[in-house]
Image (cartoon, coloured by chain):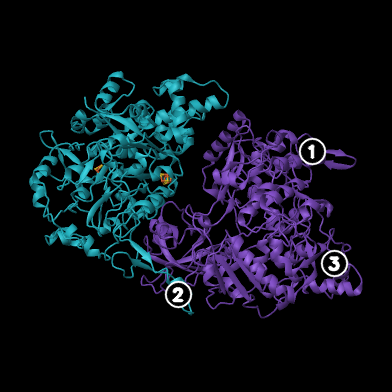
Chain colours: A cyan, B purple
């Protein structure tokens, strides 16, 4: 057993109102700069819908994540070794700008400078890639609230196999929101895909980051991530991704998206896991067993042995304590209401979701007029089809979803009975496989959801971070084109649409070279082929401390 | 007409029944032995108010309606009234929304849900109301210096000022119940407004066709009180209410200052009428026919040439270049929330928050308080010379929560002009109140808390008190003004000082005021109430407190909720738990309203009225051009999830997050009908105006309806229209205000004007629009 700590997140989809505050505050802090215009580390998708970038969930198309080879060994879906080498100058699995969207702005200054004229002035859209007039055809949230759904939504990969269950008709309409950030996976395929060793998973808290110094802009991480949460900055020519707001996490504060979440649906906390069992779990033969496999990797911080080993493995005491109080651990493991997003991608993602309950459709047909508080019979009549949620959160296993929805429904019924002065019904809890006390604790966490219960984030131990002294006076975020503002390098020339695309690579040029041209590149191609070959075929290497 | 019996007895020769029985009869609840025409059962679609009948109108399955009704009532029963109806803009702005509201309330009252925490009606609009109400109103309306203020009901103001009244397709008569007495015969809505002004029901400014400063001068010369002079002039036909001739140049509004609003970019219903008549721009796309001669007002003067460009000066104070700014003569740059000191609160949230300045206002931007002080200073300098000290005359309406409520008993309409009664100010017509204006001292007065609070006290909703201690406290806290009009008074020079004054003067933020207010209410209602505020009697929230952390407000007579021991605001809990009478004619909640005009409309009880029939009233809207496919749809403008009225909708992030410009949402079926695909450019038009925008095709919108979210300004990504080669319109280009006569009612119990409290609503929801595909090549 090798105990590690990971900061994880749970989002309770029951509460997401689709306001996109998380997206805006994240963008404002992290990607509101040249080269990152189209990048949303946090985005919110309306489901059913194709998402951002389009159809990111379809790994037949994008070849992201992992798969098992014929011998049952884990390998990158995009292929390892040779295939990658052959494709190093032309990666067929990369999304193009239109799969995201062409970012735009407006000539706002027209509104203040236009001379007196017959028609009142108007600001019109201009491409942020070319600077030219543009006609807006797609955006990062094009299908918000089922906009354009008749044309697009049926291409949602999660609708596969649902057939007649889903009709895009007014009376049958259903939707919910799916906020997404990087999953900070236990077995990140982005890290494994990187030929330059620029991507790494932090030893102390599992946050997955791109070393901007090392990144050479190969973009195998972009295609390798099945969640499409690594992005290519077309100004710096380097990869960027959600940092889980690590400067805040280190200070014991929640991420920006969590802090500003209007629905207060995000939870942050530690999970202890056994690093020795990650590869085995990710290699579980049956996709439907991946959830249990991942849960099996997690360790119980109440177990004295786990605690002792954690201590021996260098995890500070207050972190172990924090793991005991972790809402993420509680929701995923203790109450088993949180589920990983697309476990079948085999990256062992660490942002989990509580699936949404939804109104009972055609209530008068499905439930007997008896007790309307009797919720169990209605689980299969909920507006959001169980099978749809299963495609999203349990590799298609509807039983898992049913179990979670049952627990959530039981919690509501149980608490309602208690609230309206009738006797709390222990039978309700038991029917969902829970103790009454657990139901009440879960209620406190999910419904009351106080700030201090949602975010249990231990501060970083400065005494363990030797390099901190050297970093005094810098903000750590001021790499060229980065969001930091302590002496940041000004942005280079506007990129063209083409520079975003694959031309640089197709021409055999180093993209980073092409874009970051004001600094002579003293190191030639730092392609670590050995490392890359290794990474392509096994679980992510542990970063060395 | 339906005939149904109700149980009744004869008392002193009169037939008496209960409102409840009348209501059951109205709703078709049959009981043994009652004569008449009753539904056969819930599944009878022929008789009104059955579940089966509503299904044909709403498309909601009758069985579902029954189930929801049962669950709603069952829940209320189990929880002692904790069933709630939660609504946003919802049914608001439909023509008959007042009736819809009353049906909601009836349902809740019948289930015992009103005045219960967790139950009742949670009405999530109108949050512009502020918690520290009395403090705010003292400053906002300068009640510390001069009373009463001039406060206008917005809807009739815009309706008349922008000449929307000249484009009616029907009149009040159309709406009369078959059982009516003919009270609306020949009456146009503008006539209703004129009557409301004349009878003191609604405020109406300008009030007369003569400057009130001149009226007082004339009175002085004649040696009579101004009110007497005005009554005589009116009676003898030399003086007229401006509402009787709104298009006479002397009655135009001439100067408009827009602050914190975007009338011309989002919220002004009948946008194109405003452009044409109030502003006189060539950009107006309005093409409606004027009211045909036979439907024109009986009383309000009809001028053959409708005026265009009534305004002389339009000033806007804003920090964004909105549509309103683009049409303005003067734009003053304003500080944003992070560049000024201010307070923030609503009637629904239990906290009062501060805005604090993070950075000073950039460039030439000024804080709101600063901007108005500067305007005040320049105005005062000029006015001292040109206006000096004058007597002004205010025609004030009969007010809510004052003895005015019993000025016109029995809800009968008596018009002094028609000789039905004597013109008596404050009884049968507006109060006529003389006040002194020192125009040269306006700025000095704004910068000091005036003496009237100590002298005359403060009042709200029937409670009153004198904040003598508070004014003294403010002298110490804010410092004292030396010299000028405000000599010796607390300083209000800085926005922070104004915030301090608001907090000190309200019972929601100052426990002493809350206790005093409740004590005065105790005298009025004869019940103990002060104990509600006593536990926090010593609490006083200062501005600095709110800057440190949002503060929980106190239980105060300014509101009707009990907020203590962890309870949140729920309206009417004081009424229900402490038996404080409701502010109504009977002191109870009312199912039944007996005002003559309400009876005339058949609105005595909460009943269903269908939406207005636009096709009948205004004719087909389509152009029916050869070879062009068109579809006519119900046009809704609901609140968007992403904006507070116009705020944020032109921000790049928000535009990036949704389609980059204005859109109209429509159903797949309707889109298919006219060959429109998602994101195609379309044009939506009717007699009111034209919109050029993109289509969002979705199954989330039902067939026959389209919607454009509220606050779609025309300044970002709006091309010129194909139809008339003008800049495409705003969401309000397709709307026009339609007035309901009963909303003008005043002077009768709870049906009395209260600023931002009770008055006519601007309904526009029943509107229809034509949509067609346009050339996909757009010109800006
Ligand atoms: S989601 Fe997983 S694979 Fe994708 S970038 Fe994040 S850590 Fe890497
Ligand atoms: S801020 Fe919270 S509620 Fe709003 S969209 Fe993001 S996750 Fe959902």
Asked whether mark 3 and ligand 2 are closer than 8 Å, the reply comes as no
Q: Quadrant of ligand 1?
A: top left
Helix, strand or loop status at disc 2: helix
Residue B681: x and y, percent? 39, 66
Residue B515: x and y, percent? 74, 39
Chain ID for label 3? B
Q: Would residue A142 appear left or right of B749 to someone viewing this image?
A: left
What is the spatial separation of the Cα atoms under label 2 and label 3, in whole angstroms? 56 Å
Residue contact at pointers 3 and 1, CB within 8 angstroms: no
Residue extending farthest to the right is B223
- Which mark is on residue B705? none
Chain ID for label 1? B
**Which of the two residues, B101 or B609, is positioned nearer the viewer here?**
B101
Q: Earlier in the sequence, mark 3 or mark 1?
A: 3
Q: Mark 3 sits on what residue? A: B418
To the question of a shared chain for discs 2 and 3, the answer is no
What is the spatial separation of the Cα atoms under label 3 and label 1, in whole angstroms? 42 Å
To the question of a shared chain for discs 1 and 2, the answer is no
Chain ID for label 2? A
Image-quadrant location for residue B162: bottom right
Query: Which tag is nearer the camera, tag 1 or tag 2?
Result: 2
Helix, strand or loop status at disc 1: helix
Query: Which tag is nearer the camera, tag 2 or tag 3?
Result: 2
What is the spatial separation of the Cα atoms under label 1 and label 2, in whole angstroms? 61 Å
Q: Mark 1 sits on what residue? A: B522
Query: Which tag is nearer the camera, tag 3 or tag 1?
Result: 1
Count residues near mark 1 (Cα–Cα under 10 Å), then give few for <14, some for 14-19, many for 20+: some
Q: Mark 2 sits on what residue? A: A113
Q: Residue at x 74, y 60 (%)?
A: B486
Residue B546: x and y, percent? 58, 45
Helix, strand or loop status at disc 3: helix
């Amino acid at each position: 057993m090798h105990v590690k700590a990971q900061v994880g997140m749970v989002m309770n989809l029951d509460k997401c109102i689709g306001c996109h505050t998380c997206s805006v505050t994240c963008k404002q802090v992290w990607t509101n700069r040249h080269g990152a215009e189209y990048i949303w580390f946090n985005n919110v998708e309306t489901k059913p819908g194709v998402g951002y970038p389009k159809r990111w969930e379809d790994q037949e198309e994008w070849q992201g994540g992992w798969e098992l080879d014929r011998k049952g060994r884990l390998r990158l879906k995009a292929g390892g070794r040779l295939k990658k080498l052959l494709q190093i100058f032309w990666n067929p699995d990369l999304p193009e700008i239109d799969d995201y969207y062409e970012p735009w702005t407006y000539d706002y200054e027209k509104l203040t400078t236009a001379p007196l004229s017959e028609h009142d002035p108007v600001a019109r859209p201009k491409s942020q890639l070319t600077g030219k007039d543009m006609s807006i055809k797609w955006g990062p949230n094009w299908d918000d609230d089922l906009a354009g759904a008749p044309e697009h939504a049926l291409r949602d990969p999660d609708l596969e196999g649902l057939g007649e269950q889903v009709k895009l008709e007014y009376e049958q309409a259903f939707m919910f929101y799916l906020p997404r950030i990087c999953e900070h996976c236990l077995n990140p395929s982005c890290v494994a895909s990187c030929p330059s060793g620029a991507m790494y998973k932090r030893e102390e808290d599992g946050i997955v980051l791109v070393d901007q110094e090392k990144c050479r802009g190969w973009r195998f991480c972009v295609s390798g991530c099945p969640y499409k949460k690594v992005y290519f900055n077309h100004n710096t020519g380097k990869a960027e991704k959600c940092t889980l707001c690590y400067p805040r996490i280190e200070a014991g504060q929640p991420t920006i998206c969590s802090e500003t979440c209007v629905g207060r649906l995000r939870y942050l906390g530690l999970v202890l896991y056994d690093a020795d069992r990650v590869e085995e779990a990710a290699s579980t033969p049956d996709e439907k067993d991946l959830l249990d496999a991942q849960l099996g990797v997690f360790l119980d911080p109440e177990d004295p042995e786990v605690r002792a080993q954690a201590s021996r493995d260098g995890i500070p005491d207050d972190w172990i304590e924090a793991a005991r109080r972790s809402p993420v651990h509680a929701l995923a493991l203790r109450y088993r209401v949180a589920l990983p997003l697309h476990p079948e991608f085999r990256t062992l993602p660490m942002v989990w979701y509580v699936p949404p309950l939804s109104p009972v459709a055609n209530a008068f047909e499905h439930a007997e007029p008896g007790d309307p508080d009797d919720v169990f019979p209605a689980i299969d009549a909920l507006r959001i089809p169980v099978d749809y949620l299963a495609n999203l959160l349990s590799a298609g296993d509807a039983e898992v979803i049913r179990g979670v929805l049952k627990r959530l429904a039981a919690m509501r019924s149980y608490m309602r009975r208690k609230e309206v002065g009738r006797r709390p019904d222990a039978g309700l809890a038991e029917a969902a496989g829970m103790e009454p006390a657990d139901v009440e604790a879960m209620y406190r966490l999910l419904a009351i959801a106080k700030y201090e219960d949602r975010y249990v984030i231990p501060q970083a131990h400065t005494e363990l971070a030797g390099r901190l002294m050297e970093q005094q006076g810098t903000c750590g975020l001021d790499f060229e084109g980065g969001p930091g503002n302590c002496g940041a390098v000004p942005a280079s020339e506007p990129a063209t649409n083409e520079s975003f695309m694959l031309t640089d690579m197709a021409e055999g040029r180093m993209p980073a070279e092409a874009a970051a041209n004001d600094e002579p590149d003293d190191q030639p191609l730092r392609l670590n082929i050995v490392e890359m070959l290794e990474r392509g075929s096994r679980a992510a290497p542990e970063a060395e401390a | 007409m339906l005939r149904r019996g109700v149980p009744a007895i004869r008392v002193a020769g009169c037939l008496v029944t209960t409102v409840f029985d009348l209501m059951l009869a109205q709703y078709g609840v049959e009981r043994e032995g009652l004569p008449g025409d009753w539904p056969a059962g819930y599944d009878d679609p022929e008789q009104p108010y059955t579940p089966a009948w509503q299904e044909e109108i709403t498309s909601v399955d009758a069985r579902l309606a029954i189930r929801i009704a049962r669950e709603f009532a069952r829940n209320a029963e189990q929880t002692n009234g904790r069933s709630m109806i939660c609504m946003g803009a919802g049914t608001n702005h439909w023509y008959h929304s007042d009736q819809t509201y009353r049906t909601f309330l009836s349902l809740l009252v019948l289930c015992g849900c009103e005045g219960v925490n967790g139950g009742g009606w949670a009405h999530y609009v109108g949050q512009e109301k502020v918690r520290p109400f009395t403090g705010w109103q003292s400053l906002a309306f300068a009640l510390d210096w001069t009373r009463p203020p001039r406060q206008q009901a917005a809807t009739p103001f815009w309706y008349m000022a922008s000449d929307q009244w000249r484009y009616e397709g029907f009149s009040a008569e159309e709406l009369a119940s078959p059982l009516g007495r003919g009270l609306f015969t020949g009456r146009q809505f503008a006539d209703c407004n004129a009557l409301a002004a004349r009878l003191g029901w609604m405020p109406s400014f300008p009030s007369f066709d003569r400057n009130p400063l001149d009226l007082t001068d004339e009175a002085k010369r004649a040696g009579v009180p101004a009110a007497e002079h005005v009554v005589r002039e009116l009676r003898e036909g030399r003086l007229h209410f401006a509402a009787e001739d709104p298009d006479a140049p002397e009655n135009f509004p001439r100067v408009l200052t827009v602050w914190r609003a975007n009338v011309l970019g989002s919220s002004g219903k009948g946008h194109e009428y405003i452009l044409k008549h109030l502003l006189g721009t060539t950009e107006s796309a309005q093409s409606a026919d004027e009211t045909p001669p036979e439907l024109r007002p009986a009383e309000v003067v009809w001028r053959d040439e409708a005026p265009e460009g009534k305004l002389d000066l339009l000033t806007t104070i804003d920090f964004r270049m909105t549509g309103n700014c683009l049409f303005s003569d003067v734009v003053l740059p304003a500080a944003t929330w992070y560049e000024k000191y201010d307070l923030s609160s609503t009637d629904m949230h239990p906290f009062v928050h501060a805005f604090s300045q993070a950075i000073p206002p950039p460039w030439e931007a000024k804080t709101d308080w600063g901007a108005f002080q500067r305007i005040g200073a320049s105005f005062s300098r000029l006015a001292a010379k040109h206006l000096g000290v004058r007597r002004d005359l205010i025609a004030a309406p009969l007010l809510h929560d004052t003895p005015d409520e019993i000025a016109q008993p029995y809800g009968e309409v008596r018009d002094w002009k028609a000789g039905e009664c004597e013109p008596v100010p404050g009884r049968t017509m507006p109060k006529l109140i003389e006040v002194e204006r020192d125009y040269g001292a306006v700025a000095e007065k704004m910068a000091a808390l005036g003496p009237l609070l100590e002298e005359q006290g403060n009042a709200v909703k029937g409670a009153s008190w004198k904040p003598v201690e508070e004014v003294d406290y403010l002298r110490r806290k804010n410092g004292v003004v030396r010299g000028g009009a405000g000599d010796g008074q607390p300083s209000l020079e800085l926005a922070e000082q104004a915030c301090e004054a608001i907090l000190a003067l309200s019972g929601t933020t100052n426990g002493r005021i809350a206790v005093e207010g409740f004590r005065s209410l105790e005298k009025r209602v004869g019940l103990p109430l002060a104990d509600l505020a006593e536990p926090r009697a010593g609490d006083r929230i200062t501005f600095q407190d709110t800057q440190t952390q949002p503060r929980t407000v106190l239980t105060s007579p300014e509101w009707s909720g009990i907020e203590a021991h962890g309870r949140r605001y729920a309206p009417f809990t004081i009424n229900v738990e402490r038996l404080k009478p409701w502010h109504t004619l009977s002191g109870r909640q009312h199912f039944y309203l007996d005002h003559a005009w309400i009876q005339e409309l058949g609105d005595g009880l909460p009943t269903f009225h269908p939406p207005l029939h636009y096709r009948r009233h205004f004719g087909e809207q389509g152009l029916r051009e050869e070879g062009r496919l068109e579809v006519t749809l119900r046009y809704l403008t609901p609140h968007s999830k992403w904006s507070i009225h116009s705020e944020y909708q032109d921000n790049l992030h928000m535009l990036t997050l949704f389609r980059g410009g204005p859109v109209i949402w429509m159903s797949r079926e309707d889109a298919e009908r006219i060959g429109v695909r998602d994101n195609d450019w379309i044009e939506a038009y009717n007699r009111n105006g034209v919109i050029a925008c993109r289509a969002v095709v979705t199954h989330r919108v039902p067939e026959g309806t389209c919607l454009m979210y509220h606050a779609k300004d025309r300044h970002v990504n709006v091309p010129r229209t194909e139809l008339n080669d003008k800049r495409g319109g705003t969401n309000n280009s397709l709307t026009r205000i339609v007035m309901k006569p009963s909303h003008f009612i005043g002077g009768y119990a709870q049906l009395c004007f209260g600023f931002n409290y009770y008055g006519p609503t601007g309904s526009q929801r029943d509107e229809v629009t034509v949509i067609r595909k346009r050339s996909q090549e757009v010109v800006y």
